[in-house]
Image: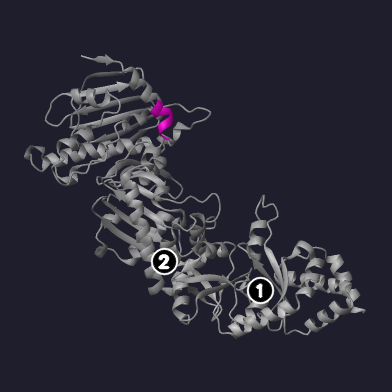
Amino acid sequence: MARTKQFKAESKKLLDMMINSIYTHKEIFLRELISNASDAIDKLYFLSLTDSSVNKSREDFRIKLSVDRENRTLTIEDNGIGMSGEELEANLGTIAKSGSFSFKQENEKQEDIDIIGQFGVGFYSAFMVSRKVVVESRRFGEDTAYRWESEGAEGYRIEECEKAETGTKITLYIKDNTEEENFDEYLEQYRISSIVKKYSDFIRYPIVMDWTSSRRKEGEDNQWEEYTEEKVLNSMVPMWKKDKKELSREDYSNFYHEQFHDYSEPLKEIHYKVEGNATYSALLYIPKKAPHNYYGRDFEKGLQLYSSGVMIMDKCEDLLPDYFGFVKGLVDSEDLSLNISRELLQHDRQLKIIAANIEKKIKNELSKAMKDDREGYEEFFRSFGLGLKFGIYNTYGACRDVLEDLLMFVSSNDKKLTTLSEYVDRCPESQENIYYACGETVDKIEMLPQTELAKEKGIEILYMTEPVDEFVAKILEIYKGKKFVNISAEDFDVSTEDEKNALRTLNEENKDMFLSMKEALGEKVADVRFTHKLRNHPVCLVSEGDISIEMQKVLNSLPNSNGIKAQLALEINKDHPIVDKLKALYESDKEMLAKYAAVLYAQARLIEGLPVENPTELTDLICEIMVK
């Protein structure tokens, strides 16, 4: 006898919300129904281990999909444990009731029970694409089968029906197309196959479908005929659950190419399993080359997230910090407390534990690669090093312990990449600082006047050519007890105490001349003085304070920079012939001294790669000086 019932008022609201809000992608419905079918088979298989009347081996179980385009139906059928009338009422009549979850609770002391379908409301995702859903099910050990039928939130109907075999058959009556939605796609065999491949490829039982293809008729060159064969849509065995000893480098490489569509070889693959506070398997890949959009706004980081072989999320951002966003791969956790809500998933404690473990693993593997495959690591760093540096910058140094030993900069010794640790290991014990210089390219840095003295003194310099580099040095401040010092800053001084005292005396003797030159330059410089840091060049600019010349360039290239200025000092080579000319002009022609000061300041700006503020005025001054 048929029984027609109404959903409770709160269930109606939940169903409506779920259909219209919770699931972002409608294709998810097939994942949910296949997972439920897999659960039903799991239950019967589990029973077969202790009950000989089941009379089925693991190889007998399957999930079958069928499409009827004419009647607009999609059918999902399993030969699992099935449901009685009471179970249909309990599991499908109450929204958010999960039979799989109850089964797991009842058998929680048993080992090797892995039930996927703990979503509760997942079955009702079918209504996102269906105008009507019919469930026909026969419970193992019972003679009577039951049909559950519903057209949505208004209610459902349960009645007895004919079903020859144990299991469940779900028939979806697919909605008609609308202006906004194309529901025909869920009646296309290739679309169904792609959804299975995406979400359910590693379900442990075969998912089969009658597949229609064309072939040339035998003996007829231009005659074609359609034929149908049963096709298995899923691969069933997740590679990451295999023993690493069974897998070759080629196996890992092929999986990487197929799954992540990168046809260059990765730097490393990371395959491991963790049991403890969070139990999960992970298969991660560190690429050598960045995709074309890696530093663009449209790049999406994240790992694929699976639960017992079923994909839950294609890009789970919370499993990777931004600075390791280049990592590709997947995580499969059996005990992750999944929710249909992405927001709830993001706050899952297990997920946070997994993410922290993955971060440590990636850092350790990159450190190993640096030692074991230096050439490969340097290729990787040229692609992704900028992201590692931004990791330190964007977190204000909070992740320095993770990243600082992975950074590399070009060394003045051999123009090759070196790490901070290698630089410090090469330093003389007496050297207290890590010296660096900033510029657009290595060649331009080498032309800086300050570079001459450092090289003459045998000091190794780190060449920083990325806009973020000096900001990173400022944030790190100290590495292994050594302070970062810019050779273009005022605190760069490698002279002896006697040399420093002699320079102070010389500057004091000429302070009036410098005051006159500073007055001529106005607010352009904070000071004018002699220096012993130069060899052949006549002048240079040095920065005073926290903002250097290169930082000024970077900051002023950003929107809304408001003309940020470094505090600069004009330093004049105390041993250059220009000094005698300046002293003579101070005694005889202070007006011409002011013009010389302007020219020297302009020269210093050009050397630093800064624009000349008034080119016309500068050329006029040079011509005036030349004809004197």
Q: Position of residue 339 (x, y in %)?
A: 33, 37
Indicate the amino acid at tag 1: Lys
Packing grade of label 2 (10 A; few <14, some 14-19, many >=20) is: some
Residue 97 found in image quarter? top left
Distance from the alpha carbon under mark 1 to that under mark 2: 32 Å
Let me know if residue 592 is in the magenta part: no
Q: Which residue is mark 2?
A: 267
**Residue at position x 48%, y 61% in the image:** 388
**Residue at position x 32%, y 51% in the image:** 354
- Looking at the picture, tell me which residue is in the foreground, 528 or 38: 528
312 relative position to 1: left or right: right
Q: Work out whether residue 233 can be spotted.
A: no
Element type where label 1 sits in the image: helix
Quadrant where the image shows the N terminus? top left
Element type where label 2 sits in the image: loop
- Looking at the picture, tell me which residue is in the foreground, 510 or 521: 510
Span shown in magenta? 17-23
Q: Position of residue 397 (x, y in %)?
A: 47, 58
Quadrant where the image shows the C terminus? bottom right
Count the labels in the image.
Answer: 2
Residue 567 found in image quarter? bottom right
Packing grade of label 1 (10 A; few <14, some 14-19, many >=20) is: some
52 relative position to 470: left or right: left
Residue 421 found in image quarter? bottom left
Is 293 rendered above or below residue 72?
below
- Kindly check if marks 1 and 2 are in contact, taking CB atoms under 8 A apart as contact: no
Q: Which residue is mark 1?
A: 444
